[in-house]
Image (cartoon, rainbow, N blue to C red):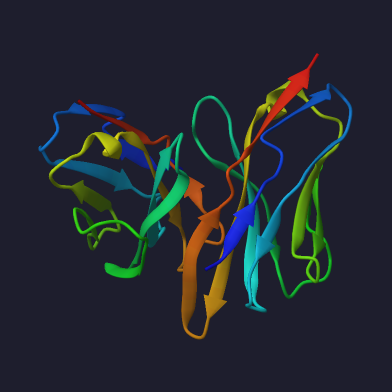
Amino acid sequence: AQTVTQSQPEMSVQEAETVTLSCTYDTSESDYYLFWYKQPPSRQMILVIRQEAYKQQNATENRFSVNFQKAAKSFSLKISDSQLGDAAMYFCAYRGTFSGGYQKVTFGTGTKLQVIP
Amino acid sequence: KAGVTQTPRYLIKTRGQQVTLSCSPISGHRSVSWYQQTPGQGLQFLFEYFSETQRNKGNFPGRFSGRQFSNSRSEMNVSTLELGDSALYLCASSPYEGNTEAFFGQGTRLTVV
């Protein structure tokens, strides 16, 4: 079974600074998707960024970027120029594929990010 | 375009009762998935539906069931509620199968007493 590990239960960052959230996963598959989701206090999950395993180029969305190391099975999220609105729980997630379909999504335990003004 | 709508937002039920939660996906989305979120177990996948067919199912007992209608709206049902079923239930929709670009609703907070 696939597992997703987020080893940092909580992190803090000063406003305007950069922070990196860690995620590792375990899989024997070669084709899969990785995601970072943000869950603010409002509880609504928001997709931050998505990475397809067959793409070597790291995904980027504005101030959010990932460092995808397929061999190391590592998928970290970097938030640049942190803003107060970035404060939330961040979940790393994995979804494998197989011929003809997709496997269920597996989430990590989350990292609570605090942004200090 | 309206987002994913989950109803009701809050629900209190008694142990042994059953409950039905509803999810209306974004217009045009055909894939709906459900998740349970608890402080102890975190986020766990329940089901995924695409075009009225269940595509994936998580490791939950048979008391948890779901379905999707022809208009893509989905319901999940939990029978014989247990205290441990208290959780935030999240629904997500995607325009296509695979939910690789999922949009979530605000969830239904179920409390079992």
Residue A62 seen in render:
no
Q: Residue at x 76, y 47 (%)?
A: A22
In the displayed structure image, the side of residue A6 where residue B36 appears, left or right: left
Q: Quadrant of residue B12?
A: top left
- Residue A99 in the image: x percent, y percent? 51, 86
- Residue A23 in the image: x percent, y percent? 71, 51
Q: Residue at x 17, y 40 (%)?
A: B81
- Residue A86 in the image: x percent, y percent? 71, 29
Residue reaching furthest to the top: A117
In the displayed structure image, the side of residue B38 where residue A66 appears, left or right: right
In the displayed structure image, the side of residue A99 where residue B72 appears, left or right: left
Rendered-image quadrant of the C terminus of chain B: top left
Q: Residue at x 67, y 79 (%)?
A: A30
In the displayed structure image, the side of residue A25 where residue A56 appears, left or right: right
Q: Residue at x 56, y 57 (%)?
A: B101
Residue reaching furthest to the right: A17
Instruction: Name the one closer to the observer, B110 or B55.
Output: B110
Q: Quadrant of residue A116?
A: top right
- Residue B79 in the image: x percent, y percent? 14, 47
